[in-house]
Image: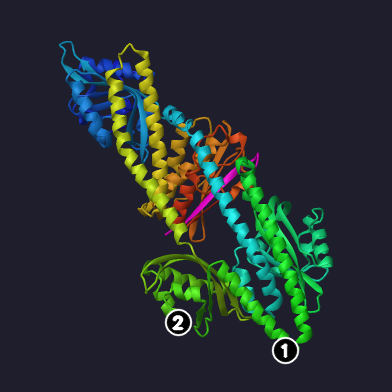
Amino acid sequence: MLNNDSNLYNNQPFLAGGGTMGEMIRKFDWSTTSIGQPEQWPIELKNMTSMLLTNAFPVLVCWGTDFIQLYNDAFRPINGETKHPQALGGSAKDTYAEIWETIGPMFADVMQGKTHGFPGFMVPLNRNGYVEECYFDFSYSPIRNVDGAIGGILVICVETTEKINSLNKSKKSEEELLNINEEMASANEEMAVTNEELFESREHLQQLLTDLAASEAKTQSIVEAAPFPIGVYLGREMRVALSNKSMLDVWGKGYDVIGKLYADILPELDNQEVFTQLDRVFNTGKPFEARNQRLGLVVNGEYKISYFNYNFTALINEAGEVYGVMNTAADVTDLVIAKQKLEETANDVSALNEELAATNEELAATNEELLVANEEHAVVNNELAEVNDKLILAQDELQLAINAASLGTFDLNPITGRFVGNDLLKSWFGLQPDEEIELHKATDAIDENDRERVVAAIQESLNYETGGDYDTYYTIINPLNAVPKIVRAKGKALFNEQHQAIRMSGVLQDVTEQRRDEQRKNDFIGMVSHELKTPLTSLTAIVQVLNSKLKNSEDSFISGALDKANIQVRKMSSMINGFLNISRLESGKIHLDKRDFSLETLIENMIAETQFSSPGYFISLSPCNPISVNADPDKIGSVISNLLSNAVKYSPKGTRIEVSCMIKGNGVEISVHDEGIGVKADDVKHLFDRYYRVDNPNYSHISGFGIGLYLSSEIIRQHKGEIWVESVPGEGSTFYFSIPLK
């Protein structure tokens, strides 16, 4: 304990100097410890104390069987925020309780006259409120009196954590590039499948729009649920008559564009030939198709370059006159970029596009033949028969399109509770084709672990304030064979003028194999990571023991080889831990340990840790009132630490990093702002994707797997919060996240 009398031991010459720790040692009431008053100390302890106070290296003296501690200013940072100043005058057994099983036997050896020392030795220390891996070059030596008796231990210790972590991170670039290439190949395959679905469905959708006037509400629901953009423009002036949400998202517009001119809502397309293409289709009646077309669009106020596959198809009435144009599209930006990076797949993609073009021409020819046949048939039959035949034909084609896509369809009347679906959907729910579906039968077939969540999702979509969107995954247990089937349900609710839900229609898609593939991949990564940790732990111990036994070896090759082996082992351990965290997270094995804690204190600790390891930056915390939250402090701390670490990595030395927190509504918002190189708008939306790395030569020297931000986003999601970023290239970035207060 510190004594208020600042002159208590100033009369002891051997306690002179020593900076801050010298003053604390002179103020300390040593009569409360087992070593007693300083004037009664043995000459050996006095000499060691005088030496450590005047030494520039980190020095710790542990005296007596209780290992009472004295240390200098250079050693103080090793104890961090939680071990200092309690360590002064305390027992090393208490200060380093979490690693005493490791260093305790070494202390016992030193008290028997043996010396210990290791370079790059790792111990897990809790010195800043959480456990971290710390590395040190150290030696433990006995302190003897003139008779040879050992009274204590001299510890000379230099921390090498930052150096070793830097070495580990510098080795990750090659594996990271391999991961990116694999992700790009996967994206290429997925976009190819999307293209096939787009071109297969285009003509069926055209027929649906022109012929099913009597079923407008259902048609609009199906169009809204379609997973690709669709728009319909009427008249020579191209007035927007219909557009689903997917198309509005491409434009960056809202539903208020319905009824406006296409040229007015997208004026930036004026010099990009799109208007000319539309006019040509309207005048000639011939469809237009573009593949991998480069277009510049103003989306949410920002000019953005994207690539699209799109079609313009003429809409023709019974008289053979063109009255509008249907537009279908697919955003293939990721595919085009992937093709540029993966040149070896260029031939396959080119062949695929040729096949799609040929298919499109065949479908166009078939459509023209059908139109001619319909016109000839209209001459023979009366108007009523003509309308009836068209309706039947349109319904058949709609069903053919649904069957070809292997989709189950459903239609719910919230007022009457009537629930209908096609034969495929009935078979999934264990019903015969002629059986009526009751809503409770459908929900009873849903796995009990998903049932409550699905019912809640349906109720939420029927709320006008939510926009009516319905999109969820769940498992069906077929009562006839008990074989689980994982499906994705996507639909849209329609509302009347009183904002009451009057219908909800949509589709179900079987994604069982896709989900199982993902689970098998996660299980494999988790299993391999667990299996590799055991031999790596043993290998680490062996390498450390070999380093100890061969430290005096004159064979420089052996010493260098062991150092390299140790570096590789640590590198592999870091990689495995990262992938293991991913596996645990996606398998639901990472749980939150929520409790009340001070957010301000946690942020200050994270800033202090980052500032200590990165002294070349100015990190500040804006005034933050005391805020108590109920969350997992370790996981929220890791999110803050990751954002601070990224700010340091992507900012030049000497710049400022500003952290702030404030209460907003029922939650708290935390932000980290840097003056770094910033992120392009095209990359912002992918920053929180798993394994995503910005493709920029300016970042090639910065290591990382693209795991940190993904893990951070998942942690915040589990806390029912949000995470996002705002960035301007060349000016810096601001990362935000918010979590509920309770």
Relative to 663, is 158 on the left or the right?
left
In the image, residue 424 above or below residue 671: below
* Number of marks in the rendered image: 2
Q: Is the magenta stretch mostly helix, strand or loop?
A: strand
Q: Name the residue under label 1.
A: 384
Can you see residue 57?
no
Marks 1/2: CA distance?
35 Å
Q: Quadrant of residue 190?
A: bottom right
Q: In which quarter of the image is the C terminus?
A: bottom left
Relative to 74, is 299 on the left or the right?
right
**Which residue does the image show at 60% across and 38% down from the upper left?**
675
Assess disc 2: are there few (<14), some (14-19) or many (≥20) residues with their C-alpha within 10 Å of its C-alpha: few
The answer to whether residue 4 is magenta is no
Residue 44 spot, x, y in % from top left: 22, 15
Q: Which amino acid does label 1 sit on?
A: Leu
Q: Name the residue under label 2.
A: 438
Q: What stretch is highlighted in magenta?
A: 729-742
Residue nearest the observer in this picture, 152 or 438: 438
**Which residue does the image show at 40% across and 24% down from the upper left?**
564
Residue 529 spot, x, y in % from top left: 36, 42
Q: Which amino acid does label 2 sit on?
A: Glu
Residue nearest the observer in this picture, 712 or 690: 690
Q: Quadrant of the N terminus?
A: top left
